Amino acid sequence: MTTAAAAPVSKHAALYVENVMIRNFRGIVSCEVELEPGLTLLVGRNNVGKSRVLSALHLALGGRVADVDDFTVGSSAEPEIDVVLAPSPPSASTDEQAFDDDEGRLMGGDAQTISDPPFRERFAWRTHVRRSAEGLGARSEFKILTFDAASDSWVERAGAKDLGRIARGLVASDLVNTGRDLMEELGRRGSGVRKVLSDLDVADVTRADLELRLAGLSADIVAGSGTLASVTRSLDALNRAVGSIGAPGINPIPITLEELARSLSIDLDSGHGALPIRMHGAGARSLASLQIQGVLYERLLGADGGSLRPHPVTLVEEPEAHLHPQAASELPHLLKSIGGQVVASTHSSQVVTATDPRAIRLLRESAGSLVVVDLGPAAKDSPGTPRPFRPSRHTEEMEKLKRLAERPFGEILFASAIVIGDGATERGFLPPVLRHALGPKAHGVCVIDPESMSTPTALSVAKFANVVGVPWFIFADGDPAGVAAVEGLATAGRSVATVIWVGKPDAAAAKGVSGAIEAMIVDFDEEVGRTACERVRPDLAPVANILATMKASKGSIGQTLADVLIERYGDFHSWPSPMQKLIQAIDGVLS
């Protein structure tokens, strides 16, 4: 017997994907995303383009083949995806960046010095998606790019060299989609888990001893089982009678390591004893699937190559899928623990709230284009740079925003418009009435209750709306204190808010109630307010003082007020004037 040879010591390529530029791909006209060396989160509303960015990156990194779906419907333009590689960030604080000799050798001398001084090397290629000759399929071509200092951009020169197989091997990508399920992966031939388990990496001398013990244990199980022993005797009798079926034998457990790997079970113990993973919920199976990514890279990726393994890039669609909120808040830690780079799309407010803002890329549609807002700091403290993006203030400003607006922080990242209300009633009332009036357009409208227009939370939300370019509105009480606070808040940023006043300055005071929205409803139709109060507080029916009851039920009256208003007045054009103005203002922006 010989002992298995020790695997050669190898390292992953010391580089990362710094930039991806996408054109004419699946409806994306143009988009550029700068990636972090570790974790990058793509955040935005449904259908804004997050999954398409992941798909484009997967194709450009050689993780999948081109598909006819990569073309934009109704357009003759061919998709192009530019990828730029950078050396791993230096440990010291310096701008000098150069690839190691090993990486440079595989690039064939095609790395470019894109700025001098300081010395910064980059390596880039363009992926073309072309229609096949018969026009029914798609194929991809990879061309090495050259940096053009005059235009400060990467260009494809005439006769550009093809990206060779060796250079493409510098990076490897794996797409983990929303359907991930470790149970299914264990049973699917060719899956990453099965590839890892196909070689248990056991030394030959140890293998012989283990398989001998497995055979002995299998024989002991047969001997100790009356059922299995009787089946064995019956098969022996058949063999003696027929003699041509082969000597029978029963192995209740696999007796070779390869067969053992095929029947391997992963058990999870949630505090009540170990259970096979097939008996756990989708959330546990999804999470376990993500956790083994590191094993795939360590044991499999590039193991059959030379001393330099590819730099791994994991692309994850909605890592929070199937998970409860507490588990979702731990996801950033798990994602950062996966080797190499991780680029993930998410709809989870818990995930984005628990992530460093530097890692967040907010994708928004603007005038038909896909805009990427980078929440990291700007390069310099240039005049006109918003305070949250100035390098000298970025950490402090982002921390302040997340601390003061922690509950809505994740929510406003996904907003197409923000409405700052002035109380708990507005928070419950506005979303359902906006959905009823605006239909699908209201999906991305986020309503924030800062408790008062003069709070630091209100100011933080206003700042955020300004720095990311989200249209924002103020729906405010018209009392004197509210007027003063709103006038200061509305002009706090570079873009002035649209202010909708609820009632006249003296209306709320005349009614003896701090919230003018309640007075607005009573002035409009007292029975709407009465019915809502009696649904929320049936113990008080018939309600005598509607305004006082609303004030005492601020935490729960808003949704019910909206329900009753919609039931009685289905057409929003008949609603109170402030509501109509707010709806028309939001509709105008979103249209």
Image (tube, rainbow, N blue to C red):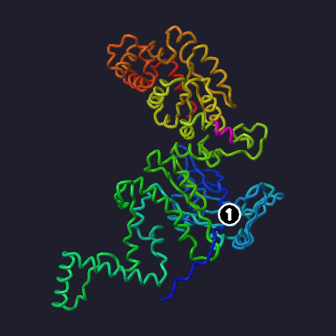
Q: Is residue 369 visible?
A: yes
For the residue pair 403 and 442, the one nearer the viewer reads as 403
- Judged left or right of residue 384, residue 542 is left
- Image height of 78 relative to 487, above or below: below
Q: Residue 16, percent across and down?
A: 66, 61
Q: Residues within 10 Å of mark 1 (few under 14, many from 20)?
A: many
For the residue pair 321 and 500, the one nearer the viewer reads as 321
For the residue pair 205 and 21, the one nearer the viewer reads as 205
Magenta region includes residue 354: no
- Image height of 288 relative to 576, above or below: below
Residue at image location 51% in from the left, 54% down from the top: 317
Task: Specify the amino acid type for callout 1.
Answer: Leu
Determine the secondary structure under disc 1: strand
Question: What segment carries the magenta color?
Answer: 395-400
Furthest residue to the right? 117
- Judged left or right of residue 216, residue 555 is right
- Judged left or right of residue 83, residue 419 is left
Residue at image location 53% in from the left, 28% down from the top: 449
* Residue that numbered label 1 is attached to: 15
- Residue 357: image quadrant is top right
- Image height of 337 relative to 532, above or below: below
Q: Main secondary structure of the magenta part?
A: helix
